Amino acid sequence: MKIFELKNRFFEQLSGIYPKEELGSFFNLLVEAWLGLKRIDLALRRDEVVAEEKLLRFEKAITRLKEYEPVQHIIGQTDFFGLQFKVDKSVLIPRPETEELVNWILNEAGKFPKILDIGTGSGCIAVNLAKKLPRAEVAALDISRSALEIAKFNAENNKVEIEFIQADVLKMESLKQEFDIIVSNPPYVRSLEKQKMQPNVLKFEPEMALYVADENPLIFYSKITKLAKNSLKPGGKLYFEINQYLAPETQKLVQNHHFKTELKKDIFGNFRMLKGIKN
Ligand code: GLN
């Protein structure tokens, strides 16, 4: 089978399930990962024959995509802000909105910041900060041992040093160290918002990293802000990714702990980030 025939088959098999643009991006990602071809090469080499064992991989990918398995799981890794991250069912797949949060921090961090990432998951925030702020001291915390395994792999793979801590932030009394920056993308999707989620998220991403109870959706923000109040240095900064539908409430909560705050929209125009500066 030639590359263009494979592409036709891929689209034929999956077009009832995914929009065309999404299929195009899945196919490009798979071709890059398994055939080593960039998008531009694809058009130029459309008549090349694809080896039998490679075809088999694509067939398996089609089957898995029909079950809504994320393409990032099928490939086993994903790009986040220019770095590669291993991902599996134990971590949230890094989202483009979170790149904007990292970028915000990068633009404002001093030269030698001491940083803590709470709920690190794949480590995408912590590893990016450590890589792009080579003189920073970065620690990252998560409740999940399997997530921390992935995050450690990602730190090593990207050649950065991070101190990893296994802990349940909701049970922590204090942080034991002082920081210039605390960042977190905690679970913030309310159960009532679950119906809006795609099947790939619902079936394959860790509930623990995503959902909070409808009655107490800001539980992580409240706890982390309290911890930050005691552990940030004066002038230290707290950065959150937030639930767009709860932006005013989240801002108020952080202000109530005497932080100066700033909300920021993501590329989709939703309030997605919040900064608190400690007085
Ligand atoms: N933005 C993510 C989503 O909608 C949620 C991330 C989170 O809960 N921290 O899938």
Image (cartoon, helix red, strand yellow):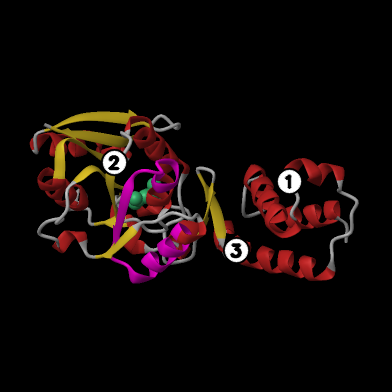
In three-dimensional space, the C-alpha distance between marks 1 and 3, rounded to whole angstroms, equals 18 Å
Q: Nearer the viewer, residue 249 or 234?
A: 234
Observer able to see residue 196: no
**Residue 38 shows which numbered tag?**
1
Q: Are marks 3 and 2 in contact (CB under 8 Å)?
A: no
User: Residue 142's quadrant in the figure?
Assistant: bottom left
Q: Amino acid at mark 2?
A: Pro
Q: What's the residue type where badge 3 is placed? A: Ile
Q: Which residue is mark 2?
A: 113
Ligand 1 within 8 Å of disc 2? The answer is no
The tag earlier along the polypeptide, 3 or 2, is: 3
Q: Are marks 1 and 2 in contact (CB under 8 Å)?
A: no
Residue appearing at x 15%, y 40% in the figure: 233
> In the rendered structure, does residue 108 fall within the stretch colored magenta?
no
18 w.r.t. 54: above or below = above
Q: Which residue is mark 3?
A: 74
Q: Secondary structure at mark 3?
A: helix
Mark with earlier residue (1, 2) = 1
Q: Which residues are magenta?
A: 129-155
Q: Residues within 10 Å of mark 3 (few under 14, many from 20)?
A: some
